[in-house]
Structures are given as structure tokens and as C-alpha cells.
Amino acid sequence: MAPKGNGPRSASSRRELPVLEQPPRIERADASRNRLAILAAAERLFAQHGVASVSMDAVATAAGVGKGTLFRRFGDKAGLAVALLDERERELQAAVLFGAAPLGPGAPAGERLDAFVTAYCEFAIKHVDLLHVSETASTGARYRIGSYRLWHRHIAGLLGEARPEIDAEYAAHALLAALAADVIKALLDQMSKRRVVAGVRAMAALYA
């Protein structure tokens, strides 16, 4: 088995991982209320009817705001999906940056990689419809989302520690391809969630 990363290298990777958080922007009280109302309405409707079946008009009506307000704030359903996913992705990011090992710092790179792909695959399964909308809104949309770049950098850093002889950037893209929402959706039509997670972990083990 290839040599594992050591403690100092893992700490370095943690420092280099970019942060999703942006500097807080000043938001008017009414704008904040509208945003929260829209997100709450969208989350409720998506849970009840499925993301594909809910229109932006329905979200605006349920939130008690005009369509113009909704579209100015989020652009389209993909933008709304990204906003709903944002907080959940921040929770995963915090676990990667500051949480307990092996998902967080302190474990060998191979163990951290296994913990991450497991956690992200479970996250993707749970939120697959929202992810699918956000990743397929337009050609290449998935690769323009900030969280994709974040996760790619994290995986590439771990692979660089575990297997310095391979092209870690390419391998990180290859692993993330198996975690794309359209792939996850297709697999869930054919096999159990447990089998999907096990398959992704096995693929990651080939690299680490």
C-alpha cells in the first residue's frame, strides 16, 4: 500500500482548503425576511412535491412575495437550489476543516479520503434532486459552482499526500465524476443507497 500522509502534511492541507463563507453583506430587514420566507417556502414545497414538480411561481406564492423579487434574488430554480444547499455544504466544510478525524484533520490522508467520499456520497444521496438542478442548469454548471472547486481541491490535496506519484488533480476530478448528481440518480434507480456508497469508497481506495 502506498505511504500515508503524516500529521504536518494533513495540517497544511487543512490550511489550504478554501472557505465557502463570504464576508457578510449588509441586508435590509425586509430583504432578509423575503429571503428567509422564500427559502422556507421552497424547502417545504420541494419536500412535499419534489424539486422538478415545483415552479418558481408556486414558490413566490407560498412565500408571499412577487415573482420579480424571487427572480432578482435567486435568478432561477438552479440558483434557489444552490442557496438551499449552501448551509448544508457549510456544515460539511466545517467538519472537514475543524471536525474530528478522520473526516477532519489528524488522520492519514487515505483515511481522510475515505471519510470524505463517504460523507459526501451520503450528502449527495440525501439532496440528490437539489444537486441535480444546481449541477445541470446549463452546460458545465457543476464545474462553476464554488463548492465543486472546494471539494476538488480537498480531494486533490489528500491524493497528493497519499499517492504523490499520480496526477492528483485529474484523479480528484475522476472521483468527483462518480459523485455527480445525475450519476447518483441513475444508480439509485438500480441499486441500494448502501451499495452506491460502498462503490464510491471502493473507487477511492484504488487511488489512496
Image (cartoon, rainbow, N blue to C red):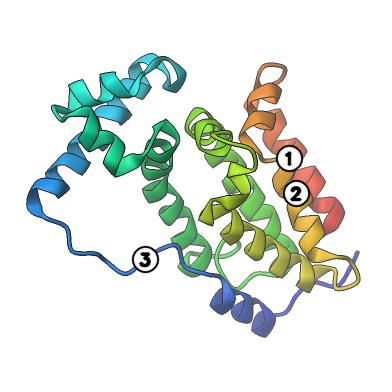
Of 206 and 33, nearer the camera is 33
Q: Determine which quarter of the picture holds residue 183.
A: top right
Q: Looking at the image, do the residues carrying marks 2 and 1 touch, with CB atoms under 8 Å apart?
A: yes
Say what secondary structure mark 3 lies in: loop
Q: Determine which quarter of the picture holds residue 70.
A: top left
Say what secondary structure mark 1 lies in: loop
Residue at 15% x, 30% y: name it: 65
Residue at 71% x, 20% y: name it: 191
- Give the x, y percent position of residue 134: 51, 37
Task: Return the disc, 3 or 1, that comes first in the chain's sequence.
Answer: 3
Name which residue type carries label 3.
Answer: Gln
Name which residue type carries label 2.
Answer: Leu
Q: Which mark's residue is nearer the viewer, 2 or 3?
A: 3
Q: Disc 1 designates what residue?
A: 178
Q: Is residue 201 above or below residue 152?
A: above
Disc tally is: 3
Task: Return the disc, 2 or 3, that comes first in the chain's sequence.
Answer: 3
User: Left or right: where does residue 172 sit relative to residue 123?
Assistant: right
Residue at 37% x, 14% y: name it: 49
Name which residue type carries label 1.
Answer: Ala
Spatial separation of the CA atoms under disc 2 and disc 3: 27 Å
- Give the x, y percent position of residue 177: 73, 43
Spatial separation of the CA atoms under disc 3 and disc 1: 28 Å
Quadrant including the N terminus: bottom right
Say what secondary structure mark 2 lies in: helix
**Circle on res. 175:** 2
Q: Which mark's residue is nearer the viewer, 3 or 1?
A: 3
Q: Disc 3 designates what residue?
A: 22
